[in-house]
Image: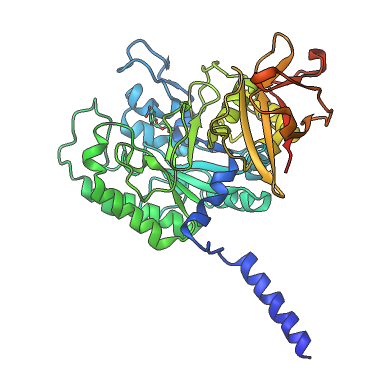
Amino acid sequence: MKKFFSVLLLFFSLQQSSVGQQVPESVDDKVQWFKEARFGMFVHWGLYSVLGGTYNGRTMPDTTLPNGKSWYAEWIQQRLEVPDAVYQALAKQFNPIRFNAEDWIREAKNAGMKYFVITAKHHDGFALWDSKVSDYDIAATPLKGRDILGELVDACKKYGLKYGFYYSHWQDWEHPQGAIPYWKPARESRDFEKYWKEKSLPQVQELIERYDPDLLWFDTWDEEAKDLINPARRDELISLVRKLSKKCLINGRIAMHNPGEEIDFLEMMDNSYPKELLEKPWQTPATMNHTWAWHRGDFNWKSAGQMLRYLVSNASKGGNYLLNVGPKPDGALPLPAVRRLREMGAWMLTHSEAVYATQPVDGLEADKGVVLTQKNVNNQRILYVHVMEERADNTVKLPIAADKVQRCQLLETGEELGLTEDGTAGLMIQLPAKASFDSAIRVLKVEMKK
Ligand code: JFZ
């Protein structure tokens, strides 16, 4: 009987820990998954997706655009000066009949992604969930009654992905006191505090209470944000998040110019890749083409191989790669994006052990076009040599002594590779014949002697 009870007790405590909110033991602990994840999916989806880069016969980029360069589809309201009323009425047209949360998350999972971040509210101010704070939200669309974010969260839980939300805490083009782009004349009463208190903070609170996210992705980038998102407001928002969640990570763009010490990870500039090792965990948000949200006229697709090289080179510096997809207004993912996700996933299928939970290798110079990651498995050091370019002589040099190496294999197939000592230069590894590869990156697995 006693035994029965203790088994019962054990059963309940196990239940507790898997069902209830997992409470990390230390601050460091809660960031651990992020440090190991390496690859995530970013999604920009909202009313701007309905326009897909075109308004009133004009398609971005357009020579009349202010400030030339970016023609992100999610910026169309500003870029093509869509009147507020016209833009906000797009809510009635947002009817994604092909939206299926599991389809999206399965693509992310199969690509090898470990987390998912979606624009709960972008700069336009439209909330992708039914917000008590504002009527400018999903409830104003034909989707009324559907909980899009909830469906995505459930799918993430089902497929084992961490999840989080982009929330534009600074710019809000709908709220009369939300911040707007610098080229617009300042709003009459610049009572940002009003917006902050009645929309920004309460919506962040809603997102946490309703969906219990693993991370929040805040966005500031402009000089102007410095005054509005000053250290006091930054810290106010951070304390709110900390008060409501033990696990929710906060990114550095909460206050890009002065993120402070309390944030959990750094956010690189868009599509930018640091050269050196960084103190904090970090990630690069990146696009597959130019735009973030879906744009009918953006054909600047990067190849899967190129994106894998970004992913791996970030991993070699201890960082993550948050790769964006812009779903169409009907909820389908664009096919060029899907093909790239699947190609990347095919590579990850046989190479992910060289990516997830690896460490950078400091102080070991590899050949040009070659990057390194490493991990310890049962006290054995394993070095992964990512060969990202064709090698003229089909060999790779490594500055380590041959007698330190136990075994060197091609990761994908397990084929053992020939090693020769290359005098003082170290080790010369012979790659298999080129003809046997069609992959963007060949990975050598070098097991070091214990
Ligand atoms: C911001 C948004 O304005 C954009 O729509 C998108 O959501 C992106 C992920 O983030 O855009 C930025 C932010 C920072 C820089 C450039 C664009 N930056 O620092 O170079």
**Is 59 on the left-hand or right-hand side of 202?**
right
x and y percent of residue 177 in the render? 23, 43
- Residues 355 and 371: in front is 371
Query: How many dots with numbers?
Result: 0
x and y percent of residue 449 in the render? 74, 39
Is residue 332 shown above or below 146? above
Q: Quadrant of ligand 1?
A: top left
Whether residue 267 appears in this view of the structure is yes
- Residues 156 and 450: in front is 450
Q: Residue furthest front?
A: 424
**Is 302 on the left-hand or right-hand side of 443?**
left
Quadrant in which the N terminus appears = bottom right
Q: Residue at x 67, y 23 (%)?
A: 426
x and y percent of residue 297 in the render? 51, 17
Q: Residue furthest left?
A: 188
Q: Quadrant of residue 236?
A: bottom left
x and y percent of residue 78 in the render? 33, 26
Quadrant in which the C terminus appears = top right
**Is 231 on the left-hand or right-hand side of 341?**
left
Q: Residue at x 77, y 30 (%)?
A: 408
- Residues 112 and 156: in front is 112
Whether residue 140 appears in this view of the structure is no
**Is 23 on the left-hand or right-hand side of 171?**
right
